[in-house]
Amino acid sequence: LPKCPRMVSPAIALAFLPLLLTVIIRYRFYFVLFYRAILIRIWKDCVTGLTREERAFQYVLTHATPGDPESILEAFDEWCSKVEFISNIGPKKGKILDRLLLEQRPLTVLELGTHCGYSTIRIARALPLGARLYSVEMDQRNAAIAEKIIRLAGFDDDTVELIVNPSDEVIPRLRSDYGLERLDFVFMDHWKKCYRPDLELLEGCGLLGKGSMIVADNVLFPGAPKFLRYIRKCGLYEWKIHRATLEYSRGIRDGMAELVYQGIK
Ligand SMILES: C[S@@+](CC[C@H](N)C(=O)[O-])C[C@H]1O[C@@H](n2cnc3c(N)ncnc32)[C@H](O)[C@@H]1O
């Protein structure tokens, strides 16, 4: 006889049903908003034949001034807060990032997760003269938009280099292919499950030195619990969380982690 697929016993399923219903009823507002947003997005993708990143890009192209990073950021913020959400770091958490960069004045910076280039521009405009930013993006379509946005803002290849590949392939090659010895500042804003393995890769490749700063976005929402557990336990960092709200939202609590590498124990 063919083997029956393993099924949850009806008794267990029934026991969990009240819990499931309570969660759905308690958070129905968020469920409705979430599915409504997905349906609207699918509908817009079909009607326009563009991704939401490409729609945002078109708005920025027609509303921002070339060579003026500030006006590009403003155009993005306007589009994302009034028309369609995309996961830029946004103006509120962006200001925290600006402040940390101005305090740190890093010469070599790595960004993981370029997306459309919003945070890339924010970082690039805060850098001191002669500094260089390496920004890593694995999605070809997003990277194509980011490249245009970065150049539209007026940053050339000497200031911002975009690397199109997954972070776990790029980090081990930063020394050999890009001649990097030490990173002064790392901004992590890619998939949250990559935060911890990529941080360990950076440590393992010897790219962090005493005083190197790592800033990681969205550690509370959607959240990076494994990353937070690791930095609490490993004892290699002084760290704190900057509390904020999720980009372009008021009610959803989020936070950015600021880590300062203390060197090998
Ligand atoms: C939240 S968005 C980044 C937003 C951007 N930092 C900003 O504030 O403007 C995340 C981006 O990271 C990229 N990404 C996710 N995992 C990655 C990885 N392992 N390597 C490179 N890029 C990655 C995704 O394709 C996506 O474009």
Image (cartoon, rainbow, N blue to C red):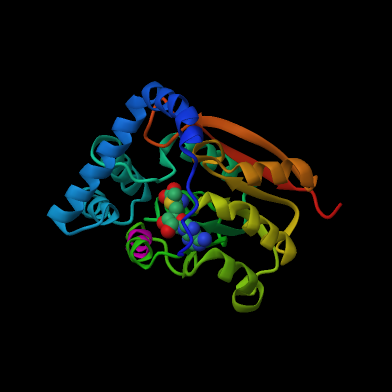
Residue at 58% from the left image edge and 43% from the top image edge: 224
Q: In percent of the image, x 32 and y 62: which residue is there?
A: 145
Note whether 166 is above or below 199 in the view shown.
below
Q: Viewer-proximal residue, 254 or 96?
A: 254
Q: Main secondary structure of the magenta part?
A: helix
- Drawn side of residue 102 relative to residue 86, left or right: right
Between residue 8 and residue 108, name the one nearer to us. Answer: 8
Residue at far right of view: 265
Front residue of this view, candidates 7 and 204: 7
Instruction: Report if residue 93 lies within the magenta region.
Output: no
Task: Point out the stretch of residues depicted in magenta.
Answer: 146-151
Residue 30 coordinates in the image, percent (x, y): 36, 29
Pinpoint residue 185: horizontal percent, then vertical percent.
62, 53
Q: Residue furthest bottom?
A: 177
Q: Is residue 161 left or right of residue 40?
A: right
Q: Residue at x 58, y 66 (%)?
A: 168
Q: State the image coordinates of residue 262 (x, y, percent, origin top left).
A: 79, 48
Q: Residue at x 53, y 57 (%)?
A: 111
Q: From the viewer's perspective, is residue 248 above or below residue 149? A: above
Against 207, residue 92 (above or below) is above
Residue 258 spot, x, y in % from top left: 64, 41
Name the side, left or right, on which 92 lies relative to 181. left
